Amino acid sequence: MNDQATRLRRMIEDKHAVNGTGFGTGNNKIGQRAGKTGPRTIAITSGKGGVGKTNLTVNLAIALGNMGKRVIIIDADMGMANVDILLGTTSRVNLMSLLNPDVVLEDVLLRGPYGVSYISGGSGLEHAMEMTVAEREILFQKLAACEDWADIILIDTGAGIGNNVLDFIVSADEVLLITTPEPTALTDAYAVMKGYSSIADQPNLKLIVNRVIDEPEIREVVGTLSRTAERFLKISVECLGYIYDDQMMIKSVRQQVPVMAGHPDAISSRCIASIASGLINGQREKVKLGWRGFLKKIFKPSY
């Protein structure tokens, strides 16, 4: 597995320039990257499914876009197409389509609604390490051009600690681990920390806690995971941010409209904007529940 991770790291770190002025047509064009520094590669992962990983990925892409950053999402959650579902779109091509000699990066780099650019992984991505040398070279050469279109690449991995997930997260520059306060989610999040720290040369993992009720719960979750990681894994785990439990987030998922786009003033949107700010500025902004949050805690409305 370390050999696999090394190959993936090299794929990400190698720099290849591609001629061109944009991709797509009409309003789908985006400018080509200037400068020699490659994009930040951030893997977003979780210990179990259903904790809001892909939802965070899509909304974080929107929040970073609002800050002027060009973002590409790689949907590496094998065969699930969750990015498509959250955006209300359908992809006819995916990353594996690049193996066709007539298909170029611009053909699979999709410009979805709300300014979200993404590449659907496709179920075949999980077999990437089983490909022939020639097939891997084709993917490498074509995917390397992503650096010309993005400042940040978000990799939405699968959940858990399977080899494919660990390959992706250990190869990324940074890892965002999202969990919820439920005991099973915390146990599975720790399992990811353990697997990641055991093979990463220089672990760089930050924690995001979703669906929290109040600050005491945040402190309890973060304290438990950070103390356990420091004691048993000998790694320091920083909390990048948290997302309050919010009915507007649930409503947005059902409507297939990201909460950052449909309800930018919602408490969950403000939390995600804070996380984006922390990624860019290196400082976490505290998000307060405010008056509406106070009323929700008192009256517990059903909407």
Image: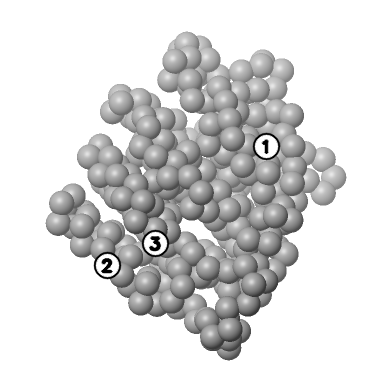
Q: Distance between the residues labelled 3 and 1?
A: 35 Å
Q: What residue type is labelled 3?
A: Pro
Q: Name the residue under label 3.
A: 181
Q: Can residue 162 be seen in this view?
A: yes
Residue 56 vs 294, above or below: the answer is above
Crowding around mark 3 (Cα neighbors within 10 Å: few <14, some 14 to 19, many 20+) is: some
Q: Residues within 10 Å of mark 1 (few under 14, many from 20)?
A: many
Residue 90 lies, with reference to residue 207, above or below; the image says above
Indicate the position of residue 186 as horizontal and vertical percent values. 34, 54
Quadrant where the C terminus lies?
A: bottom right
In percent of width and height, residue 245 lies at 53, 68
Would you say residue 150 is visible in this rendering?
no
**Of 8 and 233, the residue lying toward us:** 233
Question: In the drawing, what numbered circle is on residue 223?
Answer: 2
Q: Distance between the residues labelled 1 and 2?
A: 40 Å
Taking the image as shown, residue 148 lies to the left or right of residue 255, namely left
Q: In this view, does 217 lie to the left or right of 135?
A: left
Location of residue 124 in the rendering, given as x and y in whole percent from the top left corner: 55, 22
- Amino acid at circle 1: Leu
Q: Residue at x 32, y 65 (%)?
A: 222
Quickly name the residue at label 1: 109
- Label 2 CA crowd tier, 10 Å (few <14, some 14–19, many 20+): some
